[in-house]
Image: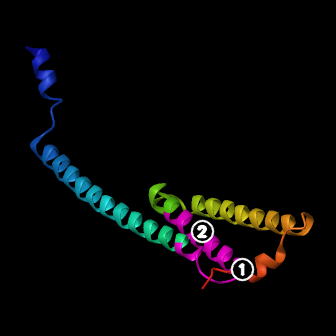
Amino acid sequence: MSSQMGFESQLPTEAERASALHKAEELVAEDKQHHTRYGIVAVWLFIITAVEVAIVFLPVATWVIVVGLFVLMAMKAIGVAGYYMHLKDDARSFSYLFGAGLFVALVLIFAFAVLYLVFSGGDTELFVKGVDSGH
């Protein structure tokens, strides 16, 4: 009989059960809000991707297209890291690390593009004037 008494004393009280239920309901509501936010971010990523595809067909200089694509790429990277990788909820230092890595990547890509154009005899005229779209 004493073993039953020890077991019963470990059961949560009615107030503890009510508190746990209330906390669980709050977590479910918060989770639903996060799912809605993920959907909104997904729609924005789709719109940015559609703009990236459309920008390629604009009758402008190639450098304008490249710069536009880089800006849109950075926007998508920030959106993915901020929401899907949960950087917006983490310590600010993680965001700074991500931003620094993104900046270094962009600088390296730009530097390699310039080196390619300078040392390979690349067609810089095409880069400056753009492609004739036939309009």
> On the rendered structure, is 41 left or right of 61?
left
- Residue at image position (15%, 23%) is 7
Which colouring convention does the figure follow?
A: rainbow
- Front residue of 49 and 33: 49
Label at residue 130:
1
Classify 105 as above or below 47.
Answer: above
Residue 23's place in the image compared with 36, above or below, is: above
Quarter of the image where the N terminus is located:
top left
Residue 45 image point, x, y percent: 46, 66
Q: For mark 2, what is the residue?
A: 74
Expressed as whole percent of the image width and height from the top left, the position of residue 108 reads: 77, 62
Residue 114 appears left or right of 71: right
Q: Is residue 60 left or right of residue 29?
A: right
How many numbered marks, from 0 up? Answer: 2
Residue drawn at (75%, 83%) of the image = 129
User: Looking at the picture, which amino acid does disc 1 mark?
Assistant: Gly
Give the structural element (helix, strand or loop) at label 1: loop
Bounds of the magenta span?
54-79
Residue 57 versus residue 38: which sits nearer the camera?
Answer: 57
Towards the viewer: 126 or 23: 126
- Image quarter hosting the C terminus: bottom right
Mark 1 to mark 2 CA distance (whole Å): 23 Å
Question: What type is the residue that disc 2 sits on?
Answer: Ala
> Element at badge 2?
helix
Estimate the x, y position of residue 124 in percent, counting from the top left: 83, 75
Measured as percent of width and height from the top left, residue 34 is found at: 33, 60
Q: Residue at point 79% right, 66% down? A: 113
Side (left or right) of 91 relative to 121:
left
Q: Nearer the viewer, mark 1 or mark 2?
A: 1
Between disc 1 and disc 2, whose residue precedes?
2
